[in-house]
Amino acid sequence: MKTLVSKLRTSGDIDFKNSTKQVSRAKDFNISNNCYFCVFDKSDEALVNDYEDILSKLLAGDSDVAEMFKQLITDFLINEPEVVNENIEDEWDGLEVSDRLNYESPIPVNPEQQKILKALNNEKCKYVVVEGPPGTGKSHTISAIAFDYILKI
């Protein structure tokens, strides 16, 4: 976090082990040790319902949901998940062309989707973010992940 704060040239330092509210400011944004969930005008109502369900379970003391949520927040704010992108890229670059072109999947997958599947099969990878504008294959990637899992069990 110190590296990020120094590169972004924000004012102040944030100690995530200290639970008091802390903010590091820059001209266009703030970094804080608070956790925010944002719902935007164009968001799907299902997402709002999911957040409400999570909050109601947390308030009701559902220990499984609370533990899962606590672990997620801890992993991202304190433990900082290990980044495997570079390793996956190096591994991809080392593959033969035939290995890049032949991937066992019931649905076609492009190289970026194959790299995501390789990341998920990496023992150091705990979380993956699939993002992009509409129509770029996010749902297809999730389907490929599900098929990959099904084929392995």
Image (spheres, grey):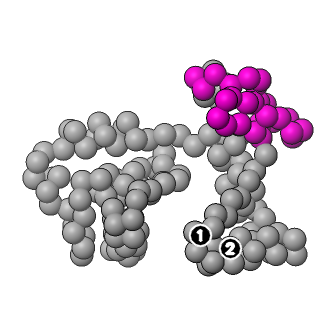
Helix, strand or loop at mark 1: loop
Residue holding disc 1? 43
Residue 11 vs 90, above or below: the answer is above
Answer with left or right where residue 68 lies relative to residue 109.
Answer: right
Q: Residue at x 79, y 46 (%)?
A: 34
Which label was assigned to residue 25? none
Establish if 94 lies above or below 118: above
Dominant secondary structure of the magenta stretch? loop
Q: Is residue 149 left or right of residue 15?
A: left
Locate residue 122, reporting x and y percent: 41, 50
Q: Are marks 1 and 2 in contact (CB under 8 Å)?
A: yes
- Could you say which is closer to the camera, residue 76 or residue 42? 42
Q: Amino acid at mark 2?
A: Val
Quadrant of the image occupied by residue 9? top right
State whether residue 90 appears in this view. Answer: yes
Q: Is residue 13 magenta?
A: yes
In percent of width and height, residue 111 lies at 24, 54
| Crowd rating for badge 1 (residues with CA inside 10 Å; few <14, some 14–19, many 20+) | few
* Badge 2 element: helix
Image quadrant where one finds the N terminus: top right
Residue displayed at 44% across by 56% down: 131
Task: Determine which residue is flagged by label 2.
Answer: 48
- Queried whether the magenta region covers residue 17, the answer comes back as yes
Residue stretch in magenta: 7-33
Identified by mark 1, the residue type is Ser
Q: Earlier in the sequence, mark 1 or mark 2?
A: 1
